[in-house]
Image (tube, rainbow, N blue to C red):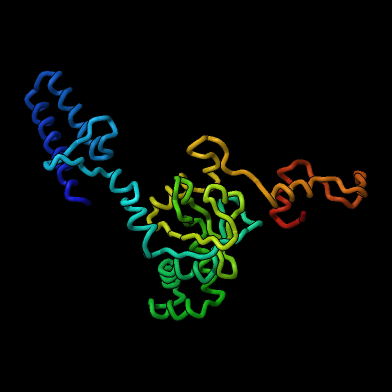
Amino acid sequence: FTLSFPDYVCRVRIRKNRLARLQGILAPVIIVRNEKRMLQEAVDALIDNGRRGRTVVGANNRALKSLSDIIEGKQGRFRQNLLGKRVDYSGRSVIVVGPKLKMHQCGLPKEMALELFQPFVIHRLIRQNIVNNIKAAKKLIQKGDDEVMQVLQEVIEGHPILLNRAPTLHRLGIQAFEPKLVGGRAIQLHPLVCPAFNADFDGDQMAVHVPLALEAQTEARMLMLASNNILSPATGEPIVTPSQDMVLGSYYLTALQPNFKKPKFGDNQKTYASLEDVIFAFEDKRVGL
């Protein structure tokens, strides 16, 4: 924290103690109410200075830096210390299209996933008595056999990752996805999330970050998952809009062929009761396009 941060804490503590003292001596209601208001203003300034109009200044007549100021902006924690530097539990690679992915999924190369989630994999290998120590676990990981890949699959199941594309110009420039292990060295991305990132597949690169704490994972899943961010925060209009190949493919798949004959009921053609049944059969690979 900056040097101005103790000033905030000191202000909050002084007003809190003063309020407790006033309540203890049964001071008039109007004085207690005024002290509560001042305490609330001190807490508000600690969280976001200047939000309620009057900016709190320090001894040198400069605005004190609040918690929000520490996080936001170019000099904030994210853009200054995380997105602009090499940090642990992060990686970057070229993005390619993943047409078989769901909107909240991304394809993560096995090589990258093994490096990013290595501490989790080592912990699970030791816990399952596959190896006895960290050194043996690292040797097993370097071999990359099926046993390690099975453990890696268990580790990433339900563990969201964050994808970011520079420049991060708005909130949707960094979103959460469920990773799916893929071959190669490129990150696979669902084409519908490209407008939010302003991404295309002509060599763009994206950074990967792994949220570690359970609270961070829950927050990523609830607030940052791509399928939960379909409206633009600026305009309120849908930012998930199909274009190019998706529109052409949808038209081609739904257009009647010149020699098309409607099958009679009861022949060898498969029939389904609803659209949901068709989608379920497609995901189960019982029918194709």
Residue 137: horizontal and vertical position, in percent? Answer: 43, 77
At 22% from the left edge and 34% from the top edge, which residue is drawn? Answer: 55
Reply above or below: 259 against 29: below
244 or 275, nearer to the observer: 244
288 or 240, nearer to the observer: 240
Reply above or below: 232 against 136: above
Quadrant of residue 62 within the rendered picture? top left
Q: Is residue 127 visible?
A: no
Residue 23: horizontal and vertical position, in percent? Answer: 11, 26
Q: Is residue 234 visible?
A: yes
In-image side of 209 versus 111 (left or right): left
Quarter of the image containing the C terminus?
bottom right
At 45% from the left edge and 66% from the top edge, which residue is drawn? Answer: 116
Residue 234: horizontal and vertical position, in percent? Answer: 48, 37
At 61% from the left edge and 49% from the top edge, which residue is drawn? Answer: 192
At 19% from the left edge and 36% from the top edge, which residue is drawn? Answer: 56
In-image side of 109 versus 88 (left or right): right
Residue 165: horizontal and vertical position, in percent? Answer: 48, 55
Q: How many marks?
A: 0
